Image (cartoon, helix red, strand yellow):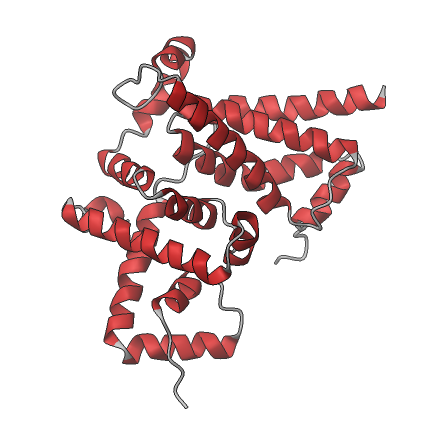
Amino acid sequence: MTKTFTPNDVIRFIYGEVSSACERKEITDALISNSELGEFYIEMTSLKRSLNKIKREPSKRSVDKILQFSKNYNLHALS
Amino acid sequence: MKANYQSDGDLVSLYINGSEKAFEQLLKRHKSKIYTTIYLIVRDQYIAEDLLQETFIKAIKKLRSGSYNEEGKFLPWIVRIAHNLAIDYFRKEKRYPTIVMEDGSNIFNSIEFSETSTESLRIKDETHETLKKMIEALPEAQKEVLIMRHYADMSFQEIAETTGVSINTALGRMRYALINLRKKLEKNNIAYDQNFYPE
């Protein structure tokens, strides 16, 4: 019996949340045989790449402040 | 290759037992996810920096007090702290609007932290700014799931638990968020912008 997959399944697939190898293969097959689903996959992966571009990094100053706070808090707790 | 990989749970245990190196590792691993999560809610890099520090200060105090009990799920826990702080800030700001500069930052921050203005110049890519604004304009529930899944790297299961909805609802919100973004990108005719496709 052929399993039917939905756009929600494609999203799980794109975000690496399909843990079973068997299901991954089934979804891959569905992306090839179902053009609508395949197109959705291409658009969503492209969008995902775009979203990756706006990942941000905090400044080194903030990171150093956090590390310093932790060290001081530790010393304070030990004294 | 991953023989030396330590889970968040391992690092938390080591930190509770006094290892600053373990904390450094946790911070290095998650700072970008947490910072981006906050940033996309408060829309101001300087406020986001402050709230990132506040988030970790809260986490440090909780971990050091010995009352942390999240069964190894460090990331969802700290993202929840960050998310709550950012939402609280956002609500307060709505009551007390500030003067916002052209780049979206608060005018007072610009004065106070002028030495870091090169950072704001660096991120001035127009296309990314447009996409960022589109994310900000999403309905709250969709934006929340998108930020938690894509930027905070939480699983749909963790998002469902954190937000009190079913996995299917979380997945549905994510799907609508992505579809809405795609429509907006098409409408703005920037879906095929070269900036989106690395050489």
Above or below: residue B49 compared with residue B186 = above
For this orientation, the residue located farthest to the front is: B95
Can you give x and y, in whole percent of width and height, for residue A19 in the image? Answer: 53, 69
Whether residue B196 sits left or right of residue B6 in the image: it is left
| The N terminus of chain B - image quarter | bottom right
For this orientation, the residue located farthest to the bottom is: A1
Can you give x and y, in whole percent of width and height, for residue B111 in the image? Answer: 38, 8
Q: Quadrant of residue B108?
A: top left
Whether residue B75 sits left or right of residue B172 in the image: it is right
Whether residue A21 sits left or right of residue B183 in the image: it is right
Q: Is residue A59 visible?
A: no
The residue located at (35%, 15%) in the rendering is B98
Q: Is residue B68 visible?
A: yes
The residue located at (45%, 56%) in the rendering is B170
The residue located at (53%, 29%) in the rendering is B52
Whether residue A63 sits left or right of residue B185 in the image: it is right
Q: Quadrant of residue A40?
A: bottom left
Can you give x and y, in whole percent of width and height, for residue B130 in the image? Answer: 24, 37
The residue located at (29%, 39%) in the rendering is B137
Q: Total label count?
A: 0
- Of residue A53 and residue B39, the one placed in the foreground of this image is B39
Can you give x and y, in whole percent of width and height, for residue B103 in the image? Answer: 28, 23
For this orientation, the residue located farthest to the right is: A79
- Of residue B199 and residue A22, the one placed in the foreground of this image is A22
